[in-house]
C-alpha cells in the first residue's frame, strides 16, 4: 500500500510538473529526487495520498525556486504543515505560478 501511495503521488506531481515545464524529460533527476522525498515522508509516517500529493507538488515547486534538495525538502515540509493546519483550504488554488 505504501508504494502505491508513493507511486501515485509521484506520478500525479510529475505529470503536473511536466505540463507546466515543457522540455523536461520523463527521466529527469528531479523525478528521482521527488520519489526519494516521498519515500522519506512515508518512512516518517505520512501515508495519506492527498497529503503526499500536496507535498510532492510543493517539493517540485520549491526545488525549482531554491535549487537545493535539502532546502526544498524543508520548504515543502513547511508548506504541507501550513496547508494541513489551515482551517480554510482553497481547492482551486495553484502551487504553480
Image: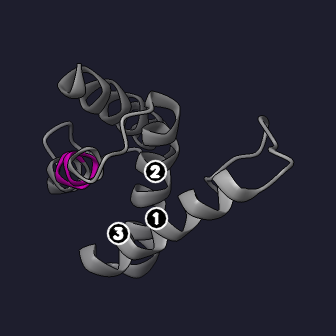
Looking at the image, is 52 positioned above or below residue 9?
A: below
Q: Say what secondary structure mark 1 lies in.
A: helix
| Residue 41 horizontal/vertical position (percent) | 30, 51
The part of the chain drawn in magenta is: 35-40
Instruction: Give the alpha-carbon distance from disc 1 to disc 3, as whole Å.
Output: 5 Å
| Residue 96 horizontal/vertical position (percent) | 61, 53
Label 2 neighbourhood size at 10 Å, few (<14), some (14-19), many (20+)?
A: many
For residue 80, which quarter of the picture? bottom right
Chief SS of the magenta region = helix
Do callouts 2 and 3 mark residues in contact (Cβ within 8 Å)? no
Quadrant of the snapshot with the C terminus: bottom right
Quadrant of the snapshot with the N terminus: top left
Looking at the image, is 6 positioned above or below residue 20?
A: above
Q: Which residue position is annotated with label 1? A: 76
Residue 73 disc label: 3
| Front position in the image: 39 or 65 | 39
User: Is 38 colored magenta in this rendering?
Assistant: yes
Do callouts 1 and 3 mark residues in contact (Cβ within 8 Å)? yes
Q: Which residue position is annotated with label 2? A: 55
Q: Say what secondary structure mark 3 lies in.
A: helix
| Residue 46 horizontal/vertical position (percent) | 37, 44
Amino acid at each position: 500500500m505504501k508504494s502505491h501511495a508513493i507511486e501515485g503521488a509521484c506520478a500525479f506531481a510529475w505529470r503536473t510538473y511536466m505540463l507546466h515545464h515543457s522540455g523536461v524529460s520523463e527521466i529527469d533527476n528531479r523525478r528521482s529526487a521527488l520519489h526519494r522525498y516521498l519515500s522519506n515522508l512515508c518512512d516518517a509516517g505520512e501515508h495519506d495520498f492527498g497529503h503526499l500529493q500536496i507535498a510532492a507538488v510543493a517539493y517540485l515547486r520549491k526545488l525549482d525556486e531554491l535549487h537545493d534538495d535539502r532546502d526544498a525538502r524543508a520548504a515543502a515540509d513547511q508548506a504541507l504543515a501550513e496547508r494541513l493546519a489551515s482551517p480554510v483550504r482553497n481547492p482551486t488554488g495553484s502551487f504553480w505560478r
